[in-house]
Amino acid sequence: LEPYSKKVILPHEDTLATPKADRLELMRHCRANFSPIFGLFADREEKFAHICTPLEENKPLYDFTDHYGERHTVWAVDGQAPLEALQRLMAPRQIFIADGHHRYDTALRYSREASANGSPGSGYVLAVLVSLQDPGLLILPFHRLLKGLTEEQLALLQKNAARHFAVTAGGPEGGSAFRNGGSGAAEISLILPRGDFMLRAKEKESSGELDVSLLKRLLLDPLFDSSALEKHLDFVTGAAEARRAVQSGKAQAAFLLQPTPMEAVTARALQGENMPQKSTCFHPKLPAGLLIHHLEESH
């Protein structure tokens, strides 16, 4: 674990208080990490794959297909030579947090608490590290669901949409969701019970901002103060799921967003600029509980 001030571990998203409080209680009671931080690092020369690929000739610890139909294969890194090679490779590198901001923040706080009690593993956190150049790395968007709005808030939402965006009827071209690998242009699809609308930011409003940041600044922040937003906002990764939520009355409105480009994530992290929470959904992920890091064991 490293504090963000050292610029070794780089976040790119804001966090929410409630999930961190839940995770802290879990760590206090179980004294373990069950779900790894998802970290990214630059490896243009593909040294990581060069070290690890030969290990795949060994018998894996686990090899199974989960309930989503995704296959997981896990090998142990045995032998001093590959361990030392990985240590040399990773030691000088910065790590971008792809997924797990709440878990990392919580681990930092827990380490400060546990250090007084002499818990030897509390200075570390379970993590999976993936090369930014890995061809299998995928970024999906988190779509937004709004609920619990008053009539006045709904009216203000639509007023601000018309003020800051060019609004046209219908959703994105070619279907109900943007294709993966979006351009990052400021386009947002709004789903209401009465129909779909495409919001395209007016030139004076966009100033290079991503759609997820524009949505928060121009449409969500005017509706609530920061402490109340958490109660009115849900996140889903599927456009069809977002649509069903509006049609069923579970949500009053849904915003479909584009995938955030990888270069936008790393650029903002290097500049110390956080995007709104749940701006990115990196895939694939390791299932929780596959490996467990016991915080009371020495390292």
Image (tube, helix red, strand yellow):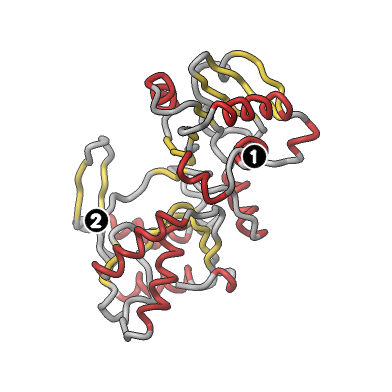
Q: Disc 1 marks which residue?
A: 222
**Mark 1: secondary structure:** loop
**Residue 213 in the figure: left or right of residue 127:** right
The residue mark sitting in front, 2 or 1, is 1
Q: Position of residue 1 (x, y in %)?
A: 44, 72
Give the residue at x 36% y 65%.
24
Residue 82's disc is none
Q: Residue furthest right?
A: 204
Depth order, front residue of 207/228? 228
The answer to whether residue 122 is seen in the rendering is yes
Position of residue 80 relative to residue 26, above or below, is below
Placement of 246 over or under 136, stated as above or below: above
Q: Position of residue 138 (x, y in %)?
A: 46, 41
Relative depth, front residue between 154 and 79: 154
Q: Earlier in the sequence, mark 2 or mark 1?
A: 1
Q: Which residue is mark 2?
A: 289
The quadrant the C terminus occupies is bottom left
Q: Say which residue appears at 44% left-offset and 60% top-offset.
A: 48
Q: Amino acid at mark 2?
A: Gly
**Dot 1, how many residues are within 10 Å of its Cα: few (below 14), some (14-19), or many (20+)?**
some
| Residue 157, image x, y percentages | 62, 29
- Quarter where residue 108 is shown: bottom left
Above or below, 147 against 90 in this view is: above
The percent position of residue 88, horizontal first and vertical second, equals 46, 73
Q: Secondary structure at mark 2?
A: loop
Residue located at (25% from left, 68% from top):
29
Residue at x 25%, y 63% (from the top left corner): 292
In screen coordinates, is 272 left or right of 18?
right
**Marks 2,1: beta carbons within 8 A:** no
- Badge 2 crowding class, 10 Å Cα cut-off, few under 14, some 14 to 19, many 20 or more, is few
Amino acid at the residue labelled 1: Pro
